[in-house]
Amino acid sequence: MKTSSSYRFFILILVVTVAGLSQGLLLPLLTILLEKAGVPSGMNGLNATALYIGIFFAMLVVEKPVRKFGYKPAILTGMALVTAATLLFPLSQNLVFWFVLRILVGIGDSALHFASQLWITSSSPAAKRGRNISLYGMAYAIGFSIGPLGINLLDFGLWVPFAVVSVFYLFAFLLMLRLPHELPVKEEGVEASTGKRYTLAIQMAWFALIPSFLYGYMESSTNSNFPVYGLRMGIGENWISILLPAIGIGSLILQLPLGMLSDRIGRKPVLVGAGVIGSLAFLAVPLMENNVWGILLLFALAGGLIGSFYSLGLAYVADLLPKPVLPAANVIASINFSVGSIVGPNLGGLGIQYGSPGSMFYFLGGVFLLFSLLGCFFQRKKQETEKALIHFTN
């Protein structure tokens, strides 16, 4: 079956949008249901990390199946796994049961994102790669912003929000079936040095790989811990469902402008500047207490700046590393995302339980400020990695 590259890109963007919608809904929805059931915030945060444990372990093995079977089977398998697990959540609120389901969602989400991300990156011409990566991030932000609004569907029954997400996945699944079967391009002399490619990626692009960790930390912490923070500060569920999308909407607005700015002045200055301002915005949230309009503005600002970290980080990695090393770097970025996503809810949940509700925002502000300081010590050029690759593969 022959399809145009633009049609393929459209379908992949649609799949990423649905994945963002699913994650944007499930994280706060499950947290609210457990909070209402009287589950301690620390245990609530620990249960939320199961999703990212699944992502982490999937990323350790997903590269080989994608190389062997192709992009499309990996995406379809991931979508089927996420849909099946999503439909099972309303059956029981047993913590162990939900922990297992969240791991399955994480595995499916990991396969879906890795394959679609690599397919877009590998098939995009160099002149459009930065733009396409930004559109990928924007698509995810759109879905992630819409997702929390599904919390309001609980008024129609416990099953309704889960069923609606599953319908979206089914629609995207049927469209994916129309795409052709493609395998990643194999580079001569690189297959025998897989471990060395990972070493080279970390050695030459460690700073550019940190944003994926920070994005995962921010995303999971705000969506898993903020509902607890909001309820304890007297903010209603309806407002929580409005405040959380503000982060994604801010990201949606600034994603492309920041990407274009980074094309002009460089990725690092944009990342460092966004990190500083974003950290200050997060640190200011506890000062608002239950002022929902103040929190809304700060979330939109922080989300607009920090929400582009993942896509900007990938673009920076592509600037620094030769093409044969990019698949390994994508795996590392996804692992970093999952590790950050595991740390976020746990650290935030423990901070709320044993410290103050605002501690989750102090942690967020602190890690982004630290990242910006690390930027002062990173200097690297792509020519250095190309020379290093020749050394590693010979």
Image (spheres, grey):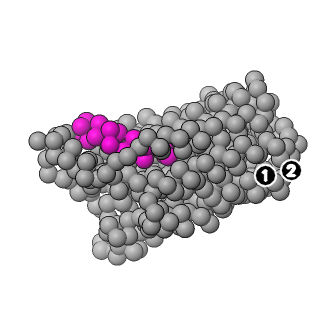
Nearest the viewer among 85 and 345 is 345
Residue 53 location, x and y as percent? Answer: 51, 34
Q: Are marks 1 and 2 in contact (CB under 8 Å)?
A: yes
Image quadrant assignment for residue 62: top left
Write the start and end of the magenta stretch as one range.
Answer: 194-213
Taken as a whole, is the magenta stretch helix, strand or loop? helix
What is the CA distance from the residue labelled 1 to the residue labelled 2? 6 Å
> Quick check: is 16 in the magenta stretch?
no
Residue 302 location, x and y as percent? Answer: 66, 53
Residue that extends furthest to the left in the rendered view of this protein: 394
Q: Badge 1: few (under 14), some or many (20 or more) residues near its Cα, within 10 Å?
A: many
Q: Which residue is mark 1?
A: 295
Q: Is residue 150 visible from the viewing direction of this image?
A: no
- Taking 71 as reference, is 259 left or right? right
Q: Secondary structure at mark 1?
A: helix
Q: Which residue is mark 2?
A: 291
> Quick check: is 195 in the magenta stretch?
yes
Residue occupying image coordinates x 81% and y 54%: 294
Q: Quadrant of the C terminus?
A: top left
Residue 383 location, x and y as percent? Answer: 25, 52
